[in-house]
Image (cartoon, rainbow, N blue to C red):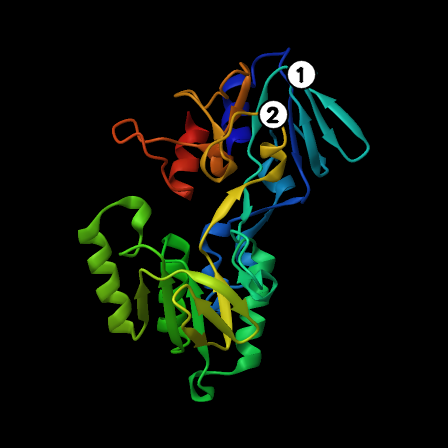
């Protein structure tokens, strides 16, 4: 989205070239991928070829994986060589972080369309509500709440959310809203476990920090993400979740001309000075800016 917005603003400038680099030749709408999990929508509904998005746009697309960023020499390292830049926009997204929890390899994640398909296929394999399918969702943030609600509503499975804070959606800090969301989920049949953290993930169970073991058919991790490791290894100043520190113009601290948007950026509430959660609404506002 940022590339499209930039192109609109500079398309009449002859000396400006925009290069978009992505490891995929398609764009994913990941924020709604929980609808893939329950089969409400197909994976193809959330994938758009980049060629369609860039049609009639003055944007050069390179299908490549960004392996590193050399801020001193103003180059981006990709498979096959380096790209020089005069201005750089980093929008590499995020990746799951498990906080060194034992058995993380046993967890499923909703971090891409492909991962949502894997969860969908696993749920199909387990069967429907008559098979006593027990789903545990780790994390009561937006992704966890949306996913649990979708599964409870559409698949009628037993769903439990485990959240370490004392309320759902803790990052937003609105207790009244959290109470309403909790009631809606409980009315759907979902169970909510608060003030408990996961210390171990087993193939068919999770262990909480108080030693309690909860059995499950599948465990889905939504407890946390961190910025792409490329960002944390680039030399940029980072904060919570390895997210790059930026100013009000999305520009990196100490590196003029380098901008960070989306899940890679540490966006701070100007009033509370607290980091805002990584979500699609904030990312879209950054793209517009």
Instruction: Report the residue marked by disc 1.
Output: 72
How many numbered callouts? Answer: 2
Indicate whether 199 appears above or below 27.
Answer: below
Q: Locate residue 157, reporting x and y percent.
A: 40, 78
**Which residue appears farthest toward the left when viewing the image?**
176
Tags 2 and 1 in contact by the CB under 8 Å rule? yes
218 sits left or right of 184 in the view: right
**Which residue appears farthest toward the bottom when viewing the image?**
130
Foreground pick, 61 / 171: 171
Indicate whether 189 appears above or below 281.
Answer: below
Using a 10 Å C-alpha cutoff, classify the residue at mark 2 as few (fewer than 14 neighbours), some (14 to 19) or many (20 or more).
Answer: some
Foreground pick, 230 / 238: 238
**Which residue is found at the position 25% from the left and 28% from the top?**
271
Element class at badge 1 = loop
On-image quarter of the C terminus:
top left
Indicate whether 17 appears above or below 115.
Answer: above
Q: Locate residue 275, reporting x and y percent.
A: 37, 35
Instruction: Report the residue marked by disc 2.
Output: 235
**Which residue appears farthest toward the front when viewing the image?**
211
**Which residue is found at the position 49% from the left and 57% from the top?**
33
Q: Locate residue 248, reporting x and y percent.
A: 39, 21
Q: Locate residue 128, reporting x and y percent.
A: 47, 83
Element class at badge 2 = loop
């Amino acid at each position: 989205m940022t590339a499209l917005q930039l192109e609109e603003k500079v398309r009449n400038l002859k000396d400006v070239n925009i290069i978009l680099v992505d490891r995929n030749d398609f764009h994913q709408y990941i924020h709604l991928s929980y609808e893939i999990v329950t089969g409400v929508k197909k994976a193809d509904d959330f994938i758009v070829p980049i060629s369609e998005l860039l049609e009639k746009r003055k944007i050069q697309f390179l299908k490549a994986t960004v392996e590193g960023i050399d801020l001193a020499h103003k180059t981006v390292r990709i498979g096959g060589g380096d790209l020089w830049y005069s201005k750089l926009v980093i929008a590499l997204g995020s990746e799951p972080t498990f906080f060194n929890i034992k058995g993380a390899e046993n967890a499923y994640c909703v971090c891409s369309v492909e991962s949502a398909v894997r969860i969908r296929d696993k749920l199909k394999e387990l069967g429907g509500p008559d098979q006593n399918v027990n789903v545990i969702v780790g994390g009561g943030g937006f992704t966890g709440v949306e996913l649990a609600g979708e599964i409870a509503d559409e698949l009628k499975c037993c769903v439990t959310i485990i959240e370490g804070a004392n309320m759902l959606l803790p990052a937003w800090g609105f207790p009244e809203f959290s109470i309403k969301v909790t009631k809606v989920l409980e009315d759907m049949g979902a169970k909510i476990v608060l003030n408990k953290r996961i210390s171990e993930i087993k193939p068919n169970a999770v262990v909480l920090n108080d030693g309690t073991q909860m059995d499950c058919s599948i465990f889905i991790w939504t407890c946390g993400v961190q910025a792409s490791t490329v960002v944390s290894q680039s030399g940029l100043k980072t904060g919570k979740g390895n997210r790059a520190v930026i100013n009000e113009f999305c520009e990196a601290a100490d590196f003029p001309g380098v901008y960070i948007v989306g899940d890679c950026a540490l966006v701070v509430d100007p009033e509370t000075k607290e980091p805002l959660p990584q979500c699609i609404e904030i990312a879209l506002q950054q793209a517009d800016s």
